Image (cartoon, rainbow, N blue to C red):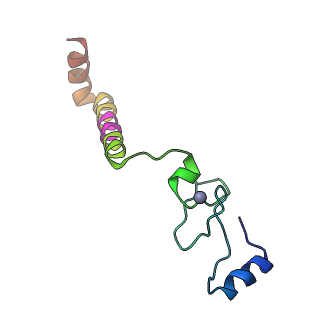
């Protein structure tokens, strides 16, 4: 959320140079901010942006499973390996 010029002046008097705050909690945003592609809004954290925080291990496992699924799809489409893939699936 954009700060008004009066709010910016009040902060500047305290030695704080800021012009935006988090859209959810109102925390002053520095150089780090969380956004979502194609949507307006800026937040201070994943929690404010998404409402939940996914821990690093879960995110890593999700990325690994996505990569494995993409590899399996690619192998199933490739003529050389497609028959092998179907054989494995039916056994
Ligand atoms: Zn926030």
Q: Which residues are magenta?
A: 64-70
Taking the magenta stretch, the answer to whether it contains residue 68 is yes
Where residue 71 appears, x then y in whole percent?
Answer: 29, 37
Looking at the picture, does residue 69 appear above or below residue 60?
above
Front position in the image: 70 or 39: 39
- 37 relative to 75 in the view: left or right: right
Tally of marks: 0
Q: Residue furthest top?
A: 91
Where residue 49 appears, x then y in whole percent?
Answer: 58, 52
Please tell me in which quarter of the rendered image ligand 1 is found.
bottom right
Where residue 91 appears, x then y in whole percent?
Answer: 19, 11
Where residue 44 appears, x then y in whole percent?
Answer: 56, 61
Taking the magenta stretch, the answer to whether it contains residue 53 is no
Looking at the picture, does residue 77 appear above or below residue 87?
below
Looking at the picture, does residue 28 appear above or below residue 14?
above
Q: Quadrant of residue 37?
A: bottom right
Name the residue at 54% across, 73% down.
31
Q: Quadrant of residue 29?
A: bottom right
Name the residue at 35% across, 42% down.
58
| Image quadrant where one finds the N terminus | bottom right
Name the chief secondary structure element in magenta: helix
């Amino acid at each position: 959320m954009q700060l008004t010029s009066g709010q910016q002046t009040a902060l500047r008097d305290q030695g704080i140079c800021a012009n935006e705050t988090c859209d959810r909690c109102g925390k002053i945003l520095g150089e780090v901010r969380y956004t979502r592609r194609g949507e307006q809004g800026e937040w201070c954290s994943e929690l404010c942006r998404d409402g939940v925080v996914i821990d690093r291990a879960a995110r890593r496992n999700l990325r690994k499973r996505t990569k494995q699924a993409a590899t399996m799809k690619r192998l199933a489409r490739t003529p050389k390996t497609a028959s092998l893939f179907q054989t494995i699936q039916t056994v």
